[in-house]
Image (tube, rainbow, N blue to C red):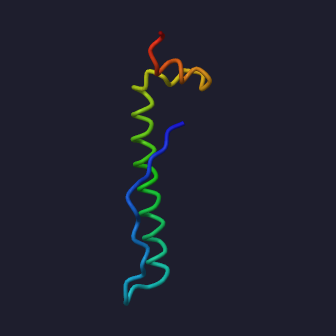
Amino acid sequence: MYLRFAAPIETGKPARVNRDTWVAGIKEKTQESLENAMAELLDIRVTDPYRELNPLAWRSATRPVA
């Protein structure tokens, strides 16, 4: 599982902006932000040497065997 916290999206409605235009702009910014975050996570996954590892084996994979 890969997680990413993206930059906050400003959702305040500016003065003199039509509500429908404002809502459409927020939707567009949100979609763009999510798509960029997903693309970055997919790039990370491609190079992750542990991507096929069973979660139950994570602990032993990250610690040297004594």
Give above or below for 49 relative to 12. Answer: above
Indicate the quadrant containing the N terminus: top left, top right, bottom left or bottom right: top right
Q: Percent position (x, y) of residue 43? A: 39, 34
Q: Percent position (x, y) of residue 61? A: 50, 18
Residue at the (41%, 54%) spot, across then down: 6
Residue most toward the right?
Answer: 56
Residue at the (39%, 41%) spot, across then down: 40
Residue at the (41%, 63%) spot, across then down: 29
Give above or below for 39 relative to 34. Answer: above
Give above or below for 58 relative to 10. Answer: above
Picture quarter containing residue 14?
bottom left
Give above or below for 30 relative to 43. Answer: below
Residue most toward the front?
Answer: 66
Q: Percent position (x, y) of residue 16? A: 37, 90
Residue at the (44%, 77%) spot, across then down: 22
Residue closer to the observer: 13 or 28: 13
Residue most toward the bottom?
Answer: 16
